[in-house]
Amino acid sequence: MSDESPFADRVVAVWARDPAQGGVLEGVHIQHLGARAFLVGKLADEGRGPDPRAGATFWFAVDDVLMLTVYPDVQSARAAFAAQGKQAIQDGPKPSRWQWRS
């Protein structure tokens, strides 16, 4: 098994199941604890305002991860999130796909 992380020198946006939901991590690697694998990294400062958790080490169970987006650096991740937020505002709320029955 290689010790090199596939996320070396990258920033990873993690989307996970509730209650964790996810975060943007730096220095991500895979760590095993017992029989479970975890994505482990330091929470990045997303630039959305002060976050006392920035710099703290977070562990996300791999089997709870829904999606990963890998960025070259924190600035690129911030730019992507800012663009996504602007697009959501321009597009307005999405209509519900819930089928109401009478």
Image (tube, rainbow, N blue to C red):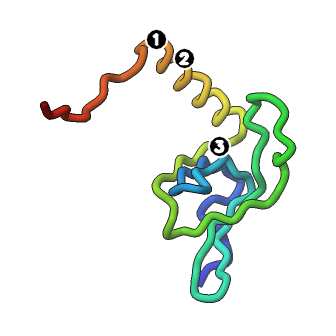
Tell me the tag on residue 44. Answer: none
Identify the amino acid type marked 3. Pro
Residue beneath the point at 58% across and 81% down: 36
Which element carries disc 1, helix, strand or loop?
Answer: helix
- The reply to whether dot 1 and dot 2 touch (C-beta < 8 Å) is yes
Residue beneath the point at 54% across and 50% down: 15
State which quadrant residue 100 falls in. Answer: top left
**Where is residue 48 shown, x and y percent of the image?**
74, 29
Q: CA distance from mark 1 to mark 2?
A: 6 Å
Circle 2 sits on which residue?
Answer: 86
- Nearest-to-viewer mark from 3 and 2: 2
> What is the tally of numbered marks visible in this picture?
3
Identify the amino acid type marked 2. Lys
Circle 1 sits on which residue?
Answer: 90
| Relative to 59, residue 46 above or below | above
Circle 3 sits on which residue?
Answer: 72
Where does the N terminus fall, quadrant-wise?
bottom right
- Tag 2 or tag 3, which sits nearer the N-term? 3
Between 68 and 8, the one lying in front of the other is 68
Identify the amino acid type marked 1. Gln
Q: CA distance from mark 3 to mark 1?
A: 27 Å
